[in-house]
Structure formats: structure tokens, C-alpha cells
Image (cartoon, rainbow, N blue to C red):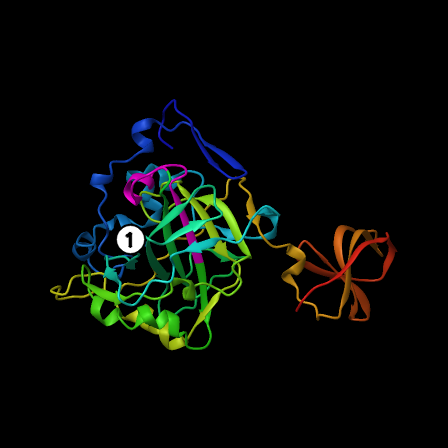
Amino acid sequence: MPVGSEERQYHHQRVTGTVAGCGAAACRPNLVSYQACSSPRCNINITQLRLDKCVSLLLYAGPDGEKAWPKKYPFCGGVFQSPIDFHKDILQYDSNLLPLEFIGYNVPSTDQFTLTNNGHSVKMYLSPTMYLRNLPFEYTASQLHLHWGNRNKSEGSEHTVSGKHFAAELHIVHYNSEKYPDVTAAMDKADGLAVLAILLEIGPFNPSYEKIFRHFRNVKYKDQMVQVPGFNIRELLPDRLDEYYRYEGSLTTPPCYPSVLWTVFRHPVKISQEQLLALETAMYCTESDDPEPLEMVDNFRNVQEFHERLVFISFREGKLYEFSTNTRVGLVSTVTFAGSQQYQDCFYADHTLKGNPYFVFQGDLVWGNYTESEEVLEEFKLDK
């Protein structure tokens, strides 16, 4: 981070962090100087002349790729960066996390969204009547956009779970409308933005996503735009909206401001292989008159250092494993297996695996010939 005397405090719900040694000028790069790149990848195996045409700050690979972002945008090399990998060591259950309340998400077809190719993603501007509740503030919708890979590999999401990438990722961006007049004013503030992230995986055809995807042919080149009839944006979200990861992070593109309260839904949404292929191949990062059009691919940032933050989750980790409805389970304070390895606060199931009772401990399935088990503190049923 740049040398300076200031310390900026970032607060959201229960997490507090400090960005040390960040001078005021460095903390707020001049937004006027920010230029969107005309390519996230720009086919690195081309001449330097072609690379220079791609305003290289938003390239995701090559010598001017994301590793070089901090040279001009210091926050990109700081703490509180996104995306991250969700793994059990950083997860903490929080019973105070409530399901989000979506207001105005069902937009009538008589209203229009604007879909555009901005040179590094496809973005759809949303209605200002859409907003979220059950967050620290009320957040108004601004836009949604997607991140994806390419046709030759299966990874395209920004966030990962236990190191696993998903096929693509949808972000729905909101700004704190209680404190700021618009997304531009909010984007560099610690409490400025709230982003919903939806992980996408391969499955059956998704008619809701097709309401956007079928318009890709009209935004094939940079700066093209098309009107999309309104529809219920909630259709793009998973069925289980009560289970999610919550953490404080950043924009995943320059200037990488650490201003985002992230809600990443636990359950992915399925789109078809054909729909994913359309996303991966339909658009170019260059303008329509460019004689050598460049495909828009691999526009996802790699996972970032976590820097001792916590991710709060709205679901108990023991539910990562599904039991049948009639399985009797309980919360066991301590289980000691042969070999003296102890597990505390386990979920116990009276079915057997490999001939032995099994337990779920912090999301891991463990089993064995146990020598001691304290009294079952609570018995209940887990739905499938």
C-alpha cells in the first residue's frame, strides 16, 4: 500500500478491519482517470501493438494483467480484496443473518432494461425502483453483469468453494441509497456497495437467464446496447435465498475499492451447456469496425489473500451433508474415537457408514469405532 499516515476503518455488521498506511490521495484514485479496458484477455499471443490497443489495465493475463493493477490502482494490492475462496477455516455461523428482502424486483415488461457490452463484460442496467432490505442499510439496484471463462475450460466464476470454480458468476450490484445519491458517489465508500453473487453451473436450460442471453447477438461488440423487456430479476437467483456467505470485500476490477458487502449464495443456479457456450463465444471486446475482433473471454479475477477476515454464514455447516428425513441425529458435545482423536460439537447420525456410526464435524464426515460419547444434548430431524 502507498506510504501515508491515515488509517481507514471499514465496518459492516460484525467485522472491522483497517487499511494501514493509506494516504488520502492514494485511498481515492481519481475516478475521471479510470478507463475501462477494451479487453479482459485480448489474446495474449498477439503483437504488442494489438495489446496496446486494449487499454491494458483491465487485462486479466499477460505482463499488464491483474498482477500489475496495483501499480496504478493501489487498492488492488491491498487488504479486503475480492474474490475469495470459501473454506471451512474461515467460516463462522451467525444466527443473526436474515434472508434478504427484495423490493421491486418484479419489473413489468413495459419497462426496459439497457443491456450493453462495455468491453470487459456484458452489463444490464437495472430499475432504480429495485432495492434490498435486511442489510445494514437500504441498497438500491444499479446493474448486473457476468464473469466467465472460455469454451476450453470449465472454470469461469470469481468466487470458489473449497478451491472449486463454477462455470460462471452473476453479480447484481446495489449502492447504499440511504447515504449516497448514486453508485458513483458510493463506490469508494466503506459502506457504499452491496453485491449479490450467484454461482452458475451446468444443468438444464434456464428460461430466466435466456431473457438476457438471447440478446447477446445485439451487443456483440464493445459499446453496443439493446433494450431488454422487464422481468422478475428474482428468477435469476437460487431457490434457497436464506443460505449464503457474507463478508466484506472489494470490487473485483480496478479501482478495487474495498467498499463491497458481499452476499454469495450457497446454492448455484443451473444453465445449459448451450447457454454457457453462448456466453463464452457471443461477444467481443473490440468495436464493430475493428478488422481483428478479439473474443471476450476469461474475465474473472483470481481469488485473493484473505488477511484474517471472517466469512459469516447463514447456515450451519453440519447441514452440508444431507440425511434422509427420518434419520435421527443429535448434537454431541464430545466424541472420542479409537486412537484418542477427539471431535467436539458434532452432529451425530444413527445410520452407519462402513459399519460404524458417523458424525459431521465442521462439514467433514468422520466415522470410526468410538470409545466414548457424551450424552446427546439435542435430538432433531434434518430435512433432506
State how many labels appear. 1
Where is 117 relative to 152, above or below? above
**Picture coordinates of residue 183 (x, y %)?**
30, 44
Q: Front-most of 50 and 15?
A: 15
Residue carrying label 1: 59
Is residue 185 within the magenta segment?
A: yes
* Residue interval drawn in magenta: 179-197
Where is 287 relative to 5, above or below? below
For this orientation, the residue located farthest to the top is: 5
Q: Work out whether residue 231 can be spotted.
A: yes
Is residue 353 within the magenta segment?
A: no
Where is 261 relative to 197, above or below? above
Local packing at callout 1 (Cα closer than 10 Å; few below 14, some 14-19, many 20+) is: many
**Residue at the spot x=46%, y=55% of the render?**
159
Asked whether, in this view, residue 340 is left or right of residue 190, the answer is: right
Identify the image quadrant of the N terminus.
top left
**Residue at the spot x=26%, y=66% of the render?**
110
**Residue at the spot x=13%, y=63% of the render?**
290
Q: Which quadrant of the structure image shows residue 4? A: top left
Identify the image quadrant of the C terminus.
bottom right
Asked whether, in this view, residue 69 is left or right of residue 244, the answer is: left
Q: Front-most of 108 and 262?
A: 108
**Picture coordinates of residue 292 (x, y %)?**
16, 66
Q: Work out whether residue 341 can be spotted.
A: no
Q: Which quadrant of the structure image shows residue 25? A: top left
Q: Amino acid at mark 1?
A: Leu
Look at the numbered disc 1 and give the secondary structure of its residue: loop
Asked whether, in this view, residue 356 is left or right of residue 181, the answer is: right
**Picture coordinates of residue 21 (x, y %)?**
40, 27
**Picture coordinates of residue 375 (x, y %)?**
86, 53
Q: Front-most of 138 and 26?
A: 138
